[in-house]
Amino acid sequence: MRGRPEDRGGADHMTIPSIGRAMPRTEDPPLLMGRGKYAADVRLPGLLQAAVLRSPHAHARLGAIRAKAALALAGVHAVITGDDLAGIGRIPTRLGHRIGHPECLQFPLTRDRVRYVGEPVAVVIAESRYLAEDALELIDVDYAPLPTVADARRALEPGAPVLHEVLAGNVVDRLETHRGDAARAMASATHRVRESFAIQRHTGVPMETRGLTASYDLGTRVLSLFGVAKVPHFNRRVLADLISHPEHLIQFVELEVGGGFGVRGEFYPEDLIVPWAAMRLGRPVQWIEDRHEHLMATNHSRQQHHDVEIGFDAEGAIVALVDRFLVDLGAYVRTHGVVVPELTSALMPGPYRIPNYSSVADCVLTNKTPTGTYRGPGRYECTFVRERLLDVAAARLGFDRLELRRRNFITPAEMPYEIGGASLAQKNVLDCGDYRSALDQALELAGYEQALAEQAQARGQGRYIGIGVGCVLEKAGLGPWEYARVEVDATGHVVVYSGVAAVGQGIATTLAQVCADQLGVAPETITVVHGDSRRVPFGVGGFASRGGAVALPAALEAAKAVRAKILRVAASLLEAHEDDLVIEDRGVHVRGVTDTRVTFRDLARAAVPGPPGMEPGLVAAHFFEAPKMTYPYGTHVAVVDVDVETGEVALLKYAIAYDVGKAINPLIVDGQLVGALAQGIGGALLEELVYDDQGQLLTTTFMDYLLPTSMEMPAETVVRILEETPTPLNPLGVKGVGEGGSSGCGGAIANAVADALAPLGVSITALPLSPDRLLALIQAAAPR
Amino acid sequence: MKERLIRLTVNGRTHEATVEARKTLADFLREDLGLTGTHLGCEHGVCGACTIIVDGAAVRSCLLFAAQMHGHEILTVESLADGDRLNPLQEAFWEHHGLQCGFCTPGFLMTLTCFLRENPHPTEAEVRVAIAGNLCRCTGYKNIVTAACAAARKIAAAPTT
């Protein structure tokens, strides 16, 4: 139950429809007052604290682990090693049907070998975190270092160290997507442009690190986990299988979630170790990741190397695209399997008509932290490659960069459009879209013509201003289904139970909004429950921008069914026809007869057992099935000022026009786009998880891994939410909005920087465009 | 382990406690006093999530020891609202969608509480500088800046009490 001040939104009203209203979020008041309970805020009697001993080596054989001194420390309860977990299997994948090789999955605690810096080797359970960390220092481990490979390209070379001997080399999977005959079309293309691109390793980095508390009731055998996120129902099943404990005796409870971005909530080694320890010790156990651990233990993402070629006919129509890329998966296959490269291949053609397309992706293992999805997985990468490639081609061939895009956009008349290939176990078919409109509106928002004039003027003054465009095709609303239950309780209060999970995005508010109109109540008065397996029996979770397109329709349908029940019970109590009834102010009356009314409270009580033939209770559940995904889209335009003396990129203006189909809450949609933009800017300009060639991670603090601050954000940001093409795939027309604010940044900013530096002949083909890298490029291009 | 007796005021209440010398102020507030509104995002003084006000100045509670706080006066995010009534800064954050996951929010609120006292009529550019030491991963800062400026106007317009 969320506290909310009484002076705000207390009254129910029917006059303003809730759907589409930019209302402040119902989640916020407790968070603003410091009352939100996050993972580290759980306190249970007898709570013990865990700390993880992590490998300092990127690759080594594991010898003896001597924990006697640690165990002798007062307040230390246990030291757990891989031997203790001998009966526990590897952590399975969650997404995608391809898992690479099963023996490349990770054990919760390694047994005989470490393969990345940060791999869990042992866990101390103690009275406090301070003591647990003292004990870590007393554990003595024998390591026999092995040759290391920290670069995906080097990992392919003959004689490179092999991480998993079960594979012949370090390629765990190869993904191929083909449409038409790309080789033939390329051979006969009038113009061909070839380039290589690289995207650096970086990741989500939520402000709250991971954390988990587990308690086990020795009497009832109920195991409870607090602080779960993203996919609680799935992870409960994984845990049940791994520890061979009945699923119904395991409870997963989500708390406030301090940011998700794809990385939080996947099943990590600690998600097994913490509950296992609680069961073993019969005491509740808490583990809170620190930031140093987070940067080496939580999924990394994004690192890819592309060699790509594009072919055009004489008029600039794309005839073929051929992409060959490597994805650096790190040391093990984690829960996302090979979904990131799969999505990269699927979305590489973007919003363009590409009749012949070939993509081959090698998934490579290296001695680095394992990887998974990060907001806009595959799309951030492929959008950078494709949009940059188009600008490179336009410059080399003398085409106008905007006309080149307009000429090749898939048009609304061609929808639904099959782009070829499959991802996430479904064919890649675009639902709807008007890509040209989004481009034109983004240009208008950015003041494109004026920016060009300013650029020309600035060049005369020796300043380097650039304008860059990035057209984004997103993919959202992953099914296969979501569950919702709507209920009017015996005190007349409306509750929405949803199988979705919160990651800080405001899903509770939007769930309340879609139900409010059906039941004639204000969304502020609705309680939303999610992420709690005790109260929500089924759920898929919060990822893939699926809340809007899958969870909201489920809640809408359940609310409609409850509305029907309200009217049915009221008709029987008021002895009237349902068509003559009005739902208003938590009650029902006959139209025109306001003095005789039955309240929700009366109706909820009368509904058990209710009229003959009706399922008892003012409650209804709905599974909304979503066999097809939506494809939101938009355009980013960046205007930058590059200081050629320092390599610093200042963002003068940033415009995004983005089509979400239907915005349930424009305030939240805008917030998602601007927030994602900040992360995209981080990826374009600052963030990089740097390894040395021995596999040592060099960026393990916020002084080395640079997140954007308020100072790096554009001087001016303008967002236009488009609702031009509602998706036909759900009754709300909603497509999803979590990721598109990021996906275009790499492309748009790199194009803008390249545009700015065009007079110097600087070639921009790799991210991030950090000052040191950019300065080196400037100096290499034009010795000054 | 070395311990120390301290006496300090937190959110207007006086506390006396025996603390381990190495215990950080943030851990003391969260664990000993149960004030879990102060969050830890990095524990090395960069992210600003743990920002509180000590004797009128915004400081990072992860970089101080509780033992140093003898005789000092501390304000945490829990002090801002009057019961369930949000103060103007909190209201502005709510109205302008200045938070998403809410984890960094207490630090921003405390930083801005201090800042708006020193600069009651800031420009957007000045607010940006003021919050440059607080990291937010959700909002892109835009709405935080808008909220801070709106709060400043709201406070200026309110009758002084």
Image: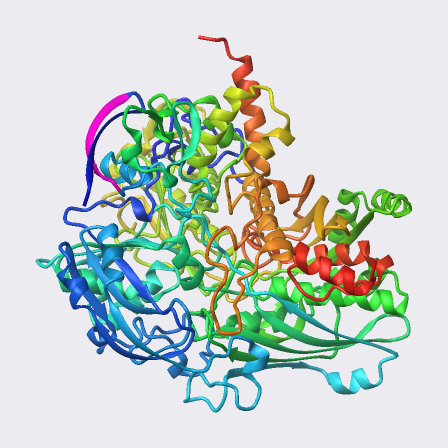
Q: Residue A177 occupies which quadrant of the picture?
A: bottom right
Q: Which residues are magenta?
A: B13-21
From this view, report whether residue A92 is shown above or below residue A485: below
Q: Is B20 covered by the magenta stretch?
A: yes
Please say whether residue A274 is visible from this viewpoint.
Answer: no
Residue beneath the point at 48% across and 42% down: B100
Colour pattern of the rendering: rainbow
From this view, report whether residue A611 is shown above or below residue A118: above
Residue A433 image offset from top left, x and y in percent:
69, 58
Q: Residue A476 occupies which quadrant of the picture?
A: bottom right
Judging depth in this view, the residue of B55 and A601 nearest the camera is B55
Judging depth in this view, the residue of A137 and A189 nearest the camera is A137
- Quarter containing the N terminus of chain A: top left
Q: Residue B124 occupies which quadrant of the picture?
A: top right
- Quarter containing the C terminus of chain A: bottom right
Dominant secondary-structure state across the stretch colored magenta: strand
Tell me if A731 is positioned left or right of A222 in this view. Answer: right
